[in-house]
Image: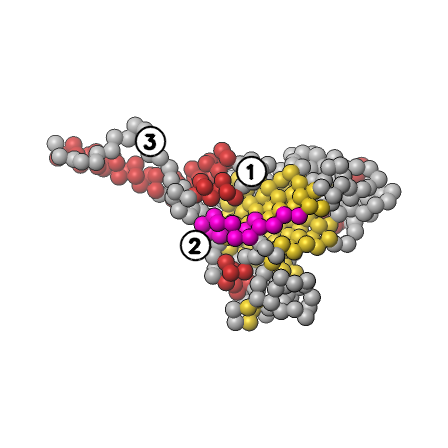
Amino acid sequence: MKSNVVSKLLIFFTFLWMFVSPSFVFADWQATLSEQFDYVETFDNLADFTGASGSGDVRSGSMPTTLDGKETNWDYYSMWTTPDLTKKWIGDQGRNNWSGNKAMALDYGGSDGVNGPSRFGYYIGEGDPARGYTDVYAFYMIKIPKSFYPTSGDSFNYFGYLKTFEIASGFRDVFSWGTPEQQALTDGSAQVDSVYGLNFTVFNHKDCNYMQCTESIYGDNLSTSINSYVSGTGSDYHYTASVEGYEFRDAAPGDLIREDKWYGVEYRIKQSSPHGAANGIIQTWIYDESGNVVGEQSLTLETFRDISVPLNHAFNKFVIGGNRSGFDAAPGGTFYVDDFIVNNKRIGLSYFALLQNGGVGNPVIAPPSQLNIVTNAQ
C-alpha cells in the first residue's frame, strides 16, 4: 500500500511540475492569448534574436523567427548606434521579463550601453494596403526604468520629445506604403513612401506637468500625447509636417516609472468615416501591473483628411519604440516590452482577467482531467 501511495504521489508531483514549470506555463500562455486575440507576441515562442551592427533602418537579412524557424511579423528594426551584440534583443532579459522567460529590449542610447535597436516594426497587411483594421486596438506591457529619463531628484526634467509607438495605415509591406500607383502621386520622400505613409499616429511621452509644453516648463509628471500626422490637400498626395498634438493628461505613467514597475498601455484608433469627417476616435489606457486602469482618455477627431483620391487603406503597420530628444542628462537608454497584442476590440481588461488567478506572468492551467490526485493517503 505504501509503495502504491508513493508512486501516485510521484505521478502527481511530476504533473504538478509540468504545469508550474515556466517552459510549460508560458508556452501555453501564448496559446491562451492567441485564442482570445487576433495577433499575439509573448516572445517566448521566438528564437533568441540579436540583429547586426549598423546604422539606419534595417529591413533585410536576419529577422526574428519562431522557435522552429518560421518567419514572423517582425519585419524591420532601426539601429542608429553601435550595439552590444552580446545582448539579446529578444530573449531572456532576467528580472526584466514580464511573463515567461523572454521579452524584447529596445534602446535609445545612453551611458548604460546600447542593448537593442531603437525600433521594431510589426506588419500584418499580407501585401495589401487595404488589409488590416479600420478600428484597431494595440496593447503591450512596458517597463521603462527611471534612469531612462532626465531627472532632478524625484522629478522629471523637461525634455523635447519621446516617441514610443506608431500606428500607420496603407502599407503593402513593412517599408512600402500604398500601391505603386499611389506612390507615384506622392512627393517621393522616404518619410511617405517607406516610413510613415500619409495617415499615421505617433504616441509620445511628454513632461509638461499637465500644461501646454514649452521649454520653460519643468514638471514632475509625464503625460501621454499623440501627434497625428495626416495627408494634405491638393491634386497630388504629399507629406506635411503639420502636427495635430493632443495630450492625454489623464493617462500619466509617471509614478509607475518612478517605482520601476511594469505597466500596460493600450491604444485605439478608429478611422473617420467618410474620410475627412471629424468622427475618428483615438483612445489610450494606462494599466498598472495588477490591471487597474490608472489613466485613460478619448478624443474624437479627423483621422483622414480630404484628399484628391480617397484612400481605401487600413491600419496594418505597428512600430514599438522610436527616438527621443532632450535626454542628454539621462544615464539610461534601455527599456523592455512584453506581451504585444493587436485586436479588433479592447484588450487590456480581458488580458488582465486571464492573468489574475495566477499572478503576473503565471496563468493558472488546469491539470489533466485524467490525473488521479491522492489527497488523503492511508
Residue 356 in view: yes
Q: Residues within 10 Å of mark 3 (few under 14, many from 20)?
A: few
Q: Position of residue 238 (x, y in %)?
A: 81, 47
Query: For the residue marked with disc 1, what is the amino acid?
Result: Tyr
Residue located beneath label 2 in the image: 94
Q: Which residue is mark 3?
A: 368
SS assignment at label 2 = helix
Q: Nearer the viewer, mark 2 or mark 1?
A: 1
Residue 197 x %, y %: 73, 45
Mark 2 crowd level (few <14, some 14–19, many ≥20, 10 Å Cα): few
Q: Nearer the viewer, residue 237 or 253?
A: 253
Give the residues in magenta.
285-299
**Is residue 241 in the magenta section?**
no
Q: Considering the image in quadrants, where does the C terminus appear?
A: top left
Mark with earlier residue (2, 1): 1
Q: Which mark is residue 346?
A: none
Amino acid, disc 3:
Pro
The amino acid sitting under disc 2 is Gly
Which quarter of the picture shows residue 182? top right
Separation of residues labelled 3 and 1 (CA atoms): 27 Å
Disc count in the image?
A: 3
Q: Which residue is mark 1?
A: 39
**Residue at x-position 65% and y-position 56%:** 247
Location of the N terminus by quadrant is: top left
Kindly indicate the quadrant of the structure image that contains residue 273.
top right
Asked if residue 316 lies left or right of residue 237, the reply is: left
Asked if the residue under mark 1 is in contact with the one under mark 3, i.e. CB atoms within 8 Å, the reply is: no
